[in-house]
Amino acid sequence: MTAATTPTELRRTPLYELHRELGARLVPFAGYEMPVQYASILEEHRAVRTAVGLFDLSHMGEIDARGPAAVDLLRHALVSDPAALEIGGAQYSMACEPDGGVIDDLIVYRLGPERFMVVCNASNRETVAAHLATLLEEGQYEATLDDRSEAIALIAPQGPRAAELLGGLTDMDLDGLANYHSAEGTVAGIECLVARTGYTGEDGFELFCDAARARDLWVALTERGGDLGLRPCGLGARDTLRLEAGMPLYGNELDRDTNPYEVNFGRVVKLDKGDFVGRDALAAVAEAGPRRRLIGLEMIDNAIPRAGYGVRRDGSTVGRVTSGTLSPTLGTKIAMAMVPAELWGIGNEFEVVVRDRPYRSQQVKLPFYRRQRD
Amino acid sequence: MSYPDDLRYSKEHEWVRADGSQSTIGITSFAADELGDIVFLELPETGATLKQFATFGVVESVKAVSDLFAPVSGTVTEVNEALRDSPELLNSDPFGEGWIARVELADPSELDALMDAEAYAAETG
């Protein structure tokens, strides 16, 4: 096997060869060569909504924080309160700059009294690691940080049949594993941290395992999943799924110039926990209310809204589309857009400018799609 | 990979089936495969004038927006209305049911500037 490197020296996950065997269309993403689709984005999207889809998310960052003061470090570095987590609990959070701008959105898992794992976007991994390292140094916290991203693979079965799939490969009590919780166990004989988290709006799991076992785990899930309608899914479907579920994507809805309140995640910010990076700036936003807000739009006229398209009201540009697509599940043309807070209102009409022409849309509630719960 | 013999092909992956001064145009299977699932089209109106190699519409996949380039100059006499509700016809049958428009040719000699099936197959490797 020759290791051909691309001109831009893209990195590869442990499952790269497997993606090639599956006929994946590979594209550069956050410095990695990743599958955007295998057969069809629409088919993969539908598999997640109706059966189970399998994602390789090994490019994402996993940073261990351990020690007596790991919790204090993370309380200071993140807007949420990791001290509120029981062992096995997890929370969605954000790391901000002193001005309240978002560095990354991430999930922090509590694995033990003095053990946490921060899972962050591939594109921000180095930034988040540096942010934590700087604060560790400055605050002299009794804790250690270990960026384990290269050593850990992440495979995510997502969909209504994900629990059924996993149930056939593990003795773990999956019924007892609630949303936003994790537990260590074995899946197909492979040691994993099994988390009930995801980015699709469906039930699902994120399986963290040793990079060396990634292929075995994927193959075991695929073999078992054949009868359940399992499909490998790429980043294309990942994007349409999260957009339907109203979830932000860093780089689209979130960036250094956006604060958590603007994207409707003020509830994640725990101003009362004590001091943390960005607290003063965020308290001011909470007090005055954010000046912009992320809204959901559904097109009335026939055009697909896309990231970057202008949004108008009464003939003037008031904002931009942050993400948009044709919703595979709903069949409607949907978008999230950032507009001035005073224009917020379900049913309010806005125009989206597509190829220099305005098309009517109206604000709708987020999320666009919510799964049926038993 | 072989392509229908009775068509002429442009570098931008459109095809023409000519029949005297009338023609039918569309995009090739190569283009459709590159695009992936096609979910939307912006098509010209009947009566619109096309100019060879100029843009005449837009085709959108889930992730991307691409221009359509006219393979010939002429007047649009009919547009495939089925594509409005079923854009996926471009993926499933790009040379048949997925035809885009009927065009009255302004200058049939323009076909000489296009490739035959063999040349197009070589071009697309």
Image: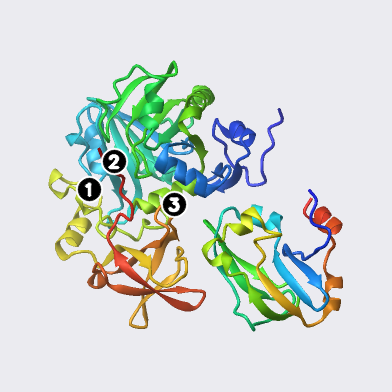
Q: Residues within 10 Å of mark 1 (few under 14, many from 20)?
A: some
Looking at the rendered structure, the kind of residue marked 3 is Thr
Q: Position of residue A140 (x, y in %)?
A: 26, 35
Compared across the picture, whether B99 is left or right of A83 comes to right
Q: Secondary structure at mark 2?
A: helix
Q: Secondary structure at mark 1?
A: helix
- Which quadrant of the figure contains the N terminus of chain A? top right
Q: Position of residue A44 (x, y in %)?
A: 50, 43
Tell me the residue that label 2 is attached to: A138
Chain ID for label 1? Answer: A
Q: Image point 39% across, 62% down: which residue?
A: A335
- Which quadrant of the figure contains the C terminus of chain A? top left
Q: Is residue A252 visible?
A: yes
Looking at the rendered structure, the kind of residue marked 2 is Glu
Tell me the residue that label 1 is attached to: A268
Q: Quadrant of residue A137?
A: top left
Q: Nearer the viewer, residue A82 or A47?
A: A47
- Number of on-image labels: 3
Compared across the picture, whether A132 is left or right of B11 comes to left
Q: Image point 67% across, 46% down: which residue?
A: A7
Chain ID for label 2? Answer: A
Q: Position of residue A337 (x, y in %)?
A: 36, 64
Numbered disc in front, either 3 or 2: 3
Q: Residues within 10 Å of mark 2 (few under 14, many from 20)?
A: few
Please determine whether, in this image, residue A161 is positioned above or below residue A357: above
Chain ID for label 3? Answer: A
| Marks 1/3 same chain | yes
Please determine whether, in this image, residue B26 is positioned above or below residue A226: below
Tell me the residue that label 3 is attached to: A240
Q: Nearer the viewer, residue A322 or B60?
A: B60
Q: Image point 33% across, 40% down: which residue?
A: A132
